[in-house]
Image (cartoon, grey):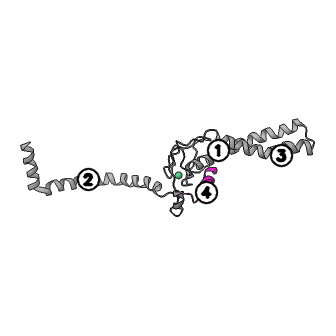
Amino acid sequence: MASRTGNDRTTKRVPAPCSDQAGYGAAQRALPIAAPLLYAAAMTTLPSASPALPSSYWQAVQRGTLCKCPRCGAAPLFRKWLKSVDACASCGQNWSHHCADDFPAYIAILITGHVLAPLMIALPLDYDWSPLAVFALLIPLSVAMMLGMLQSAKGAVIATQWWHGLHGFVKERQPEAGPALRD
Ligand SMILES: [Zn+2]
């Protein structure tokens, strides 16, 4: 203990130049290595600091429907057909904890049904189509519509959950829309 205090005193008396210079030299040597890393870290964190947040709920849903990140609109929301990315490649938003479940399928069924039901009634009654001809048209059409809108419906559901801060998402609004957060 005594020797330690002695050493401490020496470092205090002979002070700083040695230790500071040593530290300064080490920093100088480390700087060329650290600078690119620090720059890269800054560049990866900057986009998430100021993403182009949507101005309204509908803009967020529009981005989701177009299969873009609802938060920034700059990167894809899906890595496969119905598999969302774990995190946005542009703003870093974590999408892994969304909970869309079967809701996109319900939306697709609802829209497909409402579009095709009038055809299903009108074709045989008004145009005398045989039941076989009606099925031959409507079944492939309904399958194509369902598959075609499933990804967009899922994007819209994820955007809705994010906008309303559900399932662990954090509500974010543009600064001018700030008061809406208090509602
Ligand atoms: Zn994003």
Residue marked by disc 3: 118
Residue marked by disc 2: 29
CA gap between label 3 and label 2 equals 76 Å
Q: Amino acid at mark 3?
A: Pro
CA gap between label 2 and label 4 equals 49 Å
CA gap between label 3 and label 1 equals 25 Å
Does the numbered disc 4 mark a residue whose Cβ is under 8 Å from ligand 1?
no
CA gap between label 3 and label 4 equals 31 Å
In primary-sequence order, the first of circles 1 and 4 is 4
CA gap between label 2 and label 1 equals 52 Å
Q: Does 4 sit left or right of 75 as displayed?
A: left
In primary-sequence order, the first of circles 3 and 2 is 2
Q: Amino acid at mark 4?
A: Gln
In primary-sequence order, the first of circles 3 and 4 is 4
In the drawing, what numbered circle is on residue 151?
A: 1
Along the line of sight, which residue is nearer the eye, 84 or 158? Answer: 158
Residue marked by disc 4: 59
At a point 77% along the width and 43% down the height, the residue shown is 113
Residue 155, image x, y percentages: 61, 47
Of discs 2 and 1, which sits in the foreground?
Answer: 1
Element type at mark 4: helix
Q: Which residues are magenta?
A: 51-66
Q: Amino acid at mark 1?
A: Gln
Element type at mark 1: helix
